[in-house]
Image: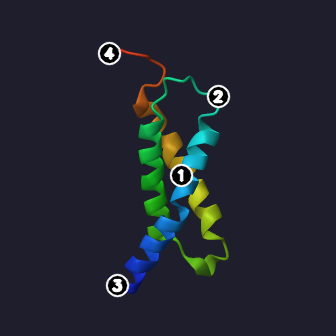
Amino acid sequence: MEPRNAQVAQLIEETLPLVTSVVHQVTARFPRHVDKDELTRAGVLGLVQAAQRYDSGQGVAFHHFAARRIRGAILDALPGTRWAARSGPP
């Protein structure tokens, strides 16, 4: 594995629990039927993107950088989740 890919994989592995934490924070007041698994998948994709784009030379801790990207990915996924409808077509 190339050094950069190894770094990205390590960042993702070490920070993966943050996704669950952010999902819980974002969905704390959402109805129970909101698909948290779908939002978690979006958060994981946000984490992967954050790990790929992270530049330690910017002076921001990866945890903080990733948390913002994870939250953004989750919020971006909300319109596609149809969480306002419990069942059936719109």
Residue at figure coordinates x 59%, y 27% from the top left: 30
**Disc number for residue 19:** 1
Residue at mark 1 to residue at mark 2: CA–CA distance: 17 Å
How many C-alpha atoms fall within 10 Å of the one at disc 3: few (<14), some, or many (≥20)?
Answer: few
User: Tell me, what colour scheme is on the image?
Assistant: rainbow
Quarter of the rendering containing residue 86: top left
**Would you name the residue on which mark 2 appears?**
29
N-term-proximal mark, 4 vs 1: 1
Type of amino acid at the residue the image marks with label 3: Glu
How many C-alpha atoms fall within 10 Å of the one at disc 2: few (<14), some, or many (≥20)?
Answer: few
Element under label 1? Answer: helix
Is the residue 49 above or below the residue 57 in the image? above
Q: Position of residue 52 (x, y in %)?
A: 44, 69
N-term-proximal mark, 2 vs 4: 2
Marks 4, 1: nearer the viewer: 1
Marks 2, 4: nearer the viewer: 2
Q: Look at the numbered discs 3 and 4 and tell me whether their residues touch, using CB distance below 8 Å.
A: no
What is the quadrant of the C terminus in the image?
A: top left
Is the residue 57 above or below the residue 50 in the image? below
**Disc number for residue 2:** 3
Type of amino acid at the residue the image marks with label 1: Val
11 horizontally vs 21: left or right: left
N-term-proximal mark, 1 vs 3: 3
**Would you name the residue on which mark 4 appears?**
89
What is the quadrant of the N terminus in the image?
A: bottom left
Is the residue 81 above or below the residue 86 in the image? below
Residue at figure coordinates x 53%, y 67% from the top left: 14
